[in-house]
Amino acid sequence: MTRGRSPLIAIGEAKRRAQAQGLTVCAPELAGDLVFHFVTCEQDRISLVRVRRLKYHWYDTAAIEHSCREDIAMMRALAVPQEIARELWVRGPDRAWHRYCVLPESIEVIERDDGPGL
């Protein structure tokens, strides 16, 4: 597992942000025991979401792959059908959100928000 406590405030912000974007959010009761923090549903897309807070402003994929390598490895290890996406939502010190799709061999930027979080 990763170091430290679960980023509970950031997880709450991420859930509110997802709902504001029109996504349906399902939060499992045993989230502390799971690799992902919540699930989002949008039409035919289901995503398992893990939230991470960072203390610096580097959000390119190489920096995220390095600083979040444990989180990414845990998401990749989940045995889920390929129709279910794995996402890493990163909140920086400026409260901006950055979303990444965790693929088997890489990560891709889904969304970048340079504004304040919700």
Image: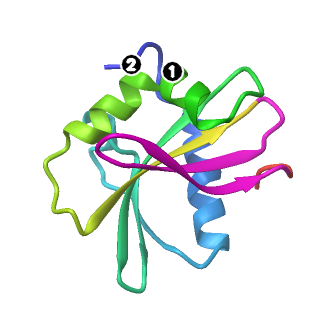
Q: Is residue 112 left or right of residue 100?
A: right
Q: Residue at x 77, y 44 (%)?
A: 96
Percent position of residue 116, x then y:
85, 49
Q: What are the residue bounds of the magenta stretch? A: 93-114
Name which residue type carries label 1: His
Q: Is residue 37 visible?
A: yes
The residue where tag 2 is placed is 2
Disc 1 is placed on an element classified as: helix
Q: Residue furthest bottom?
A: 43
| Residue 35 - label | none
Q: Is residue 86 above or below residue 41?
A: above
Q: Is residue 100 above or below residue 77?
A: below
Q: Position of residue 33 (x, y in %)?
A: 25, 35
**Residue at the (42%, 24%) spot, across then down:** 69
- Residue 28, by quadrant, is bottom left
- Number of marks present in the image shown: 2
Pick the front one: 78 or 21: 78
The answer to whether marks 1 and 2 mark residues whose Cβ atoms lie closer than 8 Å is: no
Q: Quadrant of residue 104?
A: top left
Task: Assign the N terminus to one quadrant of the image.
Answer: top left
Assign a secondary structure to mark 2. Answer: loop
The numbered mark at residue 66 is 1
